[in-house]
Amino acid sequence: MSADFLYGIEVVINGLMAGVMYALVALGFVLIFKASGIFNFAQGVMALFAALTLVGIMEGQVPFAHLINATFGTEIHHFGWHVPALLAIFLTVGVMVVFAWAVQRFLFRHLVGQEPIILFMATIGLAYFLEGVGDLMWGSDIKTLALGLPQGGARWLEDATAGLGGEDFYGFFIDKLDIVATGVAIVLVAGLIAFSQYTKHGRAMRAVADDHQAALSVGISLNFIWILVWSLAGFVALVAGIMWGAKSGVQFSLSLIALKALPVLMLGGFTSIPGAIVGGLIIGVGEKLFEFLIGPMVGGATENWFAYVLALLFLVFRPQGLFGEKIIERV
Amino acid sequence: MNDRQTGYVTEDGRQIGDVMLDLRDITLRFGGVEAIKNISFDIREGEIRAIIGPNGAGKSSMLNVISGFYVPQDGSVWFHGKKRAPLKPYQVARQGIARTFQNIALFEGMTVLDNIMTGRLNYTKSGMIAQAIWKGKAEREETENREKVERVIDFLEIQAIRKTPVGRLPYGLKKRVELARALAAEPKLLLLDEPMAGMNVEEKEDMSRFILDVNDEFGTTIALIEHDMGVVMDLSDRVVVMDYGKKIGDGTPDEVRNNQAVIDAYLGVAHDE
């Protein structure tokens, strides 16, 4: 096989891995949109906040340290302990559940029955609020997430595949972290699907996603389901935050990955979990492959815009996305 | 016949029990509009109770008050002899009051079977963690729920469409599936908002038969809103007549039929007040 072809395959594999990351973020959007019709602009910030909280808890940081010190003239920053990773993850999940409850209790409970655009604006407000709270709680410096996830290229894969393509080919270079992320994403999606198909609350969740009035009439509390859905989205945000944070450090630009989830949703449809996955993979592979094949001709940096142009094409020719519900209006 | 303690025996010999649901002096306003004006009536155990009246009389509002979708400004709802605090619709459902809607509220994306299964949600005690840990108990519960649902499916003769997504069904069958979902919850009180609206004669006959059978076989108390006077007279034990938010008649079908105020309301005599 020619080296160029093999490099093409490597690009596709790397694209798939990147796509998994996009899909992770898009998944959080889909969960909330399906159940409540709210397009949650804050999903990216939730990933950032979850990652910040995880690092903060692990490092034994005192939350709101700056605020406390400024108010009381103290000099405390650390509790002086380190929390094991697994325990810290559990605690962070707890924080995200409290966050879900608070969002429902103090924000959306007062906006029931409002126009979608109002709800969307509310989530923009929420995004900036949460970013501020994250900053205030844990500080704005870039943090490293030391969960002990494998880093760097998978050497064994490189060595094993080096012989495939003659002298110019050095083997597939795949980031170990990407492999882990893919595994985690598969488990997460399988878990979510099992949850929504086979458990009581999963069924109730699907019922609410389908028809609010009918859900109420069979005894489902909308409020409870919305807290549940925001908690799940918080959990998904934590997973996305861990993966992205481990890759590029926990910093405020993390919240911008939410923007990359938008084209993914345009492709996959806003209401489909499989759609979020497939959409993520297509965007991931598409932009890597485009950069590899066309990039050199147009001076590179196509990854910045390819996804959005693809999304635009979808908007024109298939606005409901690949898996979204077809928009038919009977007259 | 209005004795609160002893109940009565119907013409066809069914024993009607004590008062199950008692509505006292209910007034419901939307802004300046009074949809329900100081109405009182009761529903007894085992009874088929109809609420009739011209369009806009406030019948659906009344049903919405009973099922918790509307909260009346005045008056009280008594259920099984206890005054009910203002409840959310899902809390009412959990007390054993199931309902159908005038405009059908089904989960369109789910199959008929899944739709009816949602009626059993409140009988699923194991939460998500319990379901993951005590698999055996959750499975027993699931089997039991499935059996109950299959019984309802047989009863309403919808075996053939069990796996069909509800969105693809014709109107008449949707109505039946909605009834099935309400029945799956094994309600003490079943509220039907125009169960026969928009149906042809044959479908109406089927639905009437189902309503009578439900009452007969499960002993379910039923309150229904219906426009078709013939159907109402055949089905119901007692009838409440509403007009412009007021109660203008209450009694057996025969009593109501001969009530001058009711005749006027239906034939359209000028309201001189």
Image (cartoon, coloured by chain):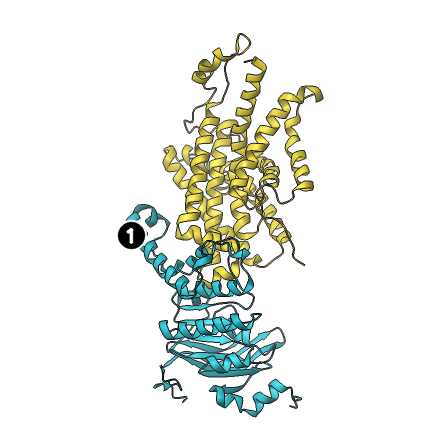
Chain colours: A yellow, B cyan
User: Would you identify the image quadrant in which residue A267 lies?
Assistant: top right
Query: In the rendered view, does B70 fall on the left or right side of B20?
Result: right
The residue nearer to you, when weighing A186 against A43, is A186
Expressed as whole percent of the image width and height from the top left, the position of residue B79 reads 40, 75
Expressed as whole percent of the image width and height from the top left, the position of residue A276 reads 54, 39
Expressed as whole percent of the image width and height from the top left, the position of residue B148 reads 36, 61
Q: Is residue B265 above or below residue A255?
A: below
Query: In the rendered view, does A274 fall on the left or right side of B19?
Result: right
Location of the N terminus of chain A (image quadrant):
top right
The residue nearer to you, when weighing B40 against A326, is A326
Q: Is residue A70 visible?
A: no
Q: Is residue A206 above or below residue A65?
A: below
Location of the C terminus of chain A (image quadrant):
bottom right
Tag 1 residue: B137
Q: Image point 49% across, 79% down: which residue? A: B50
The residue nearer to you, when weighing B110 against B99, is B110
Which residue reaches farthest top?
Answer: A167
Query: In the rendered view, does A187 fall on the left or right side of A12?
Result: left
Label 1, secondary structure: give it. Answer: helix
What is the chain identity of the residue bearing mark 1?
B
CA neighbours of label 1 inside 10 A, class few (<14), some (14 to 19), many (20+): some
Amino acid type, callout 1? Lys
Expressed as whole percent of the image width and height from the top left, the position of residue A243 reads 48, 31
Which residue reaches farthest right?
Answer: A298
